[in-house]
């Protein structure tokens, strides 16, 4: 079996960016496998259409396991993906992450390495200068943070350790090499687009806070920024472009930083065919969350009736 490079991703409610993610990253990967984690929006429909376009290169499946189980899903799929593809390396990706490198340099570097490669995050930030008519977020958002404070890395998984390693939460490390010889290669990084539109951020804030409240326990200081935005949304104050920039500048960061105009290489090399507008994504996400809560309320009465 020819040596290859594969990608593995878990996605949930990422209809605004999943098509761009797949098309861009397949410019670097021989194969990409996506696990859709019970999305309520158009993510499954988009993946099905893309799989038909990229037969044998994009594969996907659904997983309806409840709760925050991304790490468990990745660990369960890693070994079968390595066995099926014969990949020299597996790149662990989130739906908002895009390989940022010269393609041949990326390929040569991963093929030559027998240890995990650390890919530093480069976080992109929406600004008032973005073109609101551009549907593709990685074409629309062209400014990045000048510095990452702190610098966050994602890790690849080489085939040689794939059968005996465990992926850590967030895909930021592999346990078999904790403190070991993972390396960073100049010119290889991941463009990260955590904040993309007012609709996407509104959905993230509302559902994030509601999930914490349903869980019933909130850690000290947990989701403090989300709660501030949540209070504004619930008071009828719609989020603005200024909010997007503020949140993205400080996302997973201790301090803010200046911004640089630095469009993602290759982001404009494709067009989107299946991505819906942001308003429809927001409505579907909120409706699905409400439906899930109603089912939880109904379930005890159903169980009680059945028992009686």
Image: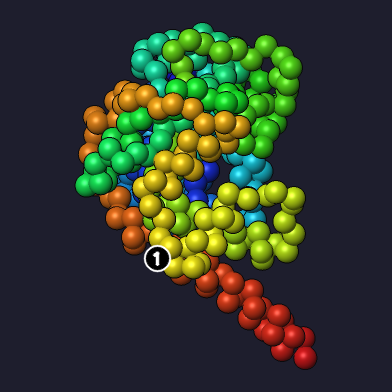
Q: On the image, which quarter does residue 292 sit in?
A: bottom right
Please report the residue visible at 24 percent of the width from the left and 34 percent of the height from the top.
270
User: Looking at the picture, how far across and down is residue 195, in whole percent?
Assistant: 44, 43
Residue farthest along the bottom direction in this orientation: 308
Residue nearest the observer in this picture, 18 or 264: 264
Please report the residue visible at 66 percent of the width from the left and 20 percent of the height from the top.
161
User: Looking at the picture, how far across and down is residue 153, in whole percent?
Assistant: 57, 25
Which class describes the residues within 10 Å of circle 1: few (<14), some (14-19), or many (20+)? some
Please report the residue visible at 40 percent of the width from the left and 22 percent of the height from the top.
100
Mark 1 element type: helix
Residue farthest along the right direction in this orientation: 308
User: Looking at the picture, how far across and down is residue 222, in whole percent?
Assistant: 68, 49
Q: Is residue 191 visible?
A: no
Residue nearest the observer in this picture, 135 or 51: 135
How are the residues colored?
Answer: rainbow
Disc 1 designates what residue? 283
Please report the residue visible at 63 percent of the width from the left and 50 percent of the height from the top.
224
**Image side of residue 143 versus residue 113, left or right:** left
């Amino acid at each position: 079996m020819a040596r290859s490079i594969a990608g593995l991703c878990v996605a949930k409610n990422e209809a605004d960016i999943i098509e761009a993610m797949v098309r861009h990253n397949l410019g670097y990967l021989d194969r990409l496998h996506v696990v859709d984690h019970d999305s309520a929006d158009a993510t499954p429909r988009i993946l099905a259409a893309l799989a038909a376009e990229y037969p044998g290169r994009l594969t996907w499946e659904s997983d309806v396991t409840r709760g925050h189980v991304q790490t468990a899903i990745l660990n369960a799929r890693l070994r079968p993906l390595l066995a099926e593809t014969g990949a020299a390396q597996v790149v662990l990706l989130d739906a908002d992450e895009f390989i940022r490198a010269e393609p041949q340099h990326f390929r040569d570097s991963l093929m030559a390495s027998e240890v995990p490669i650390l890919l530093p995050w480069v976080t992109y930030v929406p600004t008032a200068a973005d073109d609101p008519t551009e549907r593709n977020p990685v074409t629309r958002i062209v400014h990045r943070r000048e510095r990452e404070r702190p610098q966050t890395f994602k890790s690849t998984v080489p085939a040689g350790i794939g059968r005996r390693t465990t992926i850590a939460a967030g895909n930021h490390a592999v346990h078999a090499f904790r403190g070991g010889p993972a390396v960073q290669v100049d010119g290889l990084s991941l463009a990260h687009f955590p904040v993309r539109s007012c609709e996407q951020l509104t959905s993230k804030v509302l559902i994030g806070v509601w999930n914490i409240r349903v869980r019933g326990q909130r850690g000290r200081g947990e989701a403090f920024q989300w709660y501030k935005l949540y209070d504004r949304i619930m008071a009828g104050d719609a989020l603005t472009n200024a909010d997007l920039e503020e949140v993205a500048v400080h996302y997973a960061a201790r301090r803010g930083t200046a911004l640089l105009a630095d469009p993602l290489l290759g982001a404009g090399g494709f067009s989107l065919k299946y991505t819906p507008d942001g308003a429809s994504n927001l409505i579907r996400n909120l409706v699905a969350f409400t439906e899930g809560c109603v089912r939880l309320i109904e379930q005890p009465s159903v169980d009680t009736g059945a028992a009686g």
